[in-house]
Image (spheres, helix red, strand yellow):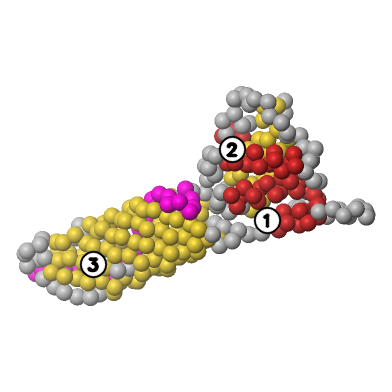
């Protein structure tokens, strides 16, 4: 994780009106009078703009209900992590992709925990002896529950559906159109999935002795890692096919692919997915007339993909 000061500074600078210096707030809209502590929330592009409106009222309500003496609450949310500072006491939290109410509740529980002075129970700080008292209190229970939320996020089921357009590098390679679907399981930044698809090559010289066309049904095993809104993926592919036209055959191709995917977040609501990929195939199909190839399947084929993705806990 990036150092605390760097994350706070970078996010505060990027958040309009949200940066704070040693002498108080800097340029930005001046809020009206609000009861309770000063609450500053900054976030990166992976977190919705509504996060401040959702978090601040919940935090203020919990602190006023306790009641707890708190002056300033600062929260930075970035890259699947959150950093919480309550009157100088800090904690780093593993969140995973932002999932709305669950992530909000997790952050609020840590704010309340730190406000009770339970920061010394955080995994990143040394343990301190508990004071001897005969008074029954629920603070240790709240602290234990909050610390437990720092565990790795639960796996999420992901579904991605895409269309694609590609072409091999040789002049005899046709343009191909395709459809694909992926069913996967994501945990933190990592995702594993299986994919099924269909691709169709443009027909070469229909109605002539050279007529050739090719369909394939690829099956893929997929592994990927997310870096913010960008996902880097690798695939192992087996594709049964069918050649039609003047010559008929049923080849099976094996290959690999590398994909760079832009996906702001696989959430419950469908989101846009954009792929830039390249495939490499071990086998190559060629239709020849008088010893000259007129139609070939690609050895190396770049492609573009566009689709939708979902993600559910």
Residue 203 lies, with reference to residue 7, above or below; the image says below
How many angstroms separate mark 2 from mark 3 (CA)? 51 Å
Mark positioned earlier in the residue sequence (1 or 3):
1
Give the SS element for disc 2: helix
**Where is residue 215 drawn, in percent x and y?**
23, 67
Magenta stretch: includes residue 29: no
**Which residue position is annotated with label 1?**
150
- Write the residue at 70% across / 38% down: 60
**Which residue position is annotated with label 3?**
215
Determine crowd level at label 2: few under 14, some 14-19, many 20+ residues with C-alpha closer than 10 A: few
Mark positioned earlier in the residue sequence (2 or 3):
2
**Which residue position is annotated with label 2?**
53
Give the SS element for disc 1: loop
- In the foreground, 299 or 57: 57
Give the SS element for disc 3: strand
Determine crowd level at label 1: few under 14, some 14-19, many 20+ residues with C-alpha closer than 10 A: some
């Amino acid at each position: 994780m990036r150092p605390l000061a760097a994350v706070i500074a970078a996010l505060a600078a990027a958040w309009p009106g949200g940066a704070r210096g040693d002498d108080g707030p800097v340029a930005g809209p001046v809020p009206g009078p609000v009861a309770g502590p000063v609450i500053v929330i900054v976030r990166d592009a992976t977190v919705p703009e509504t996060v401040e409106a959702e978090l601040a009222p919940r935090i203020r309500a919990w602190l006023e209900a306790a009641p707890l003496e708190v002056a300033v609450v600062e929260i930075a949310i970035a890259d699947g992590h959150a950093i919480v500072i309550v009157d100088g006491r800090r904690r780093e939290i593993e969140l995973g992709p932002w999932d709305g109410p669950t992530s909000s509740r997790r952050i609020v529980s840590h704010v309340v925990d730190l406000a009770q002075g339970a920061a010394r129970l955080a995994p990143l700080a040394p343990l301190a002896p508990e004071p001897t008292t005969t008074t029954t209190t629920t603070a240790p229970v709240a602290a234990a529950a909050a610390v437990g939320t720092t565990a790795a996020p639960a796996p999420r089921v992901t579904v991605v559906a895409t269309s694609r357009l590609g072409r091999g590098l040789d002049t005899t390679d046709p343009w191909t159109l395709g459809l694909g679907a992926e069913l996967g399981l994501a945990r933190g930044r990592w995702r594993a999935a299986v994919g099924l698809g269909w691709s169709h090559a443009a027909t070469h010289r229909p109605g002539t002795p050279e007529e050739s066309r090719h369909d394939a049904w690829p099956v893929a095993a997929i592994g990927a890692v997310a870096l913010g809104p960008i996902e880097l993926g690798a695939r192992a592919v087996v594709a049964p096919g069918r050649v039609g036209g003047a010559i008929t055959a049923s080849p099976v191709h094996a290959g690999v692919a590398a994909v760079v995917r832009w996906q702001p977040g696989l959430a419950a609501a469908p989101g846009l997915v954009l792929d830039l990929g390249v495939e490499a195939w071990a086998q190559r199909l060629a239709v020849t007339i008088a010893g000259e190839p007129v139609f070939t399947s690609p050895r190396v084929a770049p492609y573009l993909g566009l689709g939708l993705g979902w993600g559910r806990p």
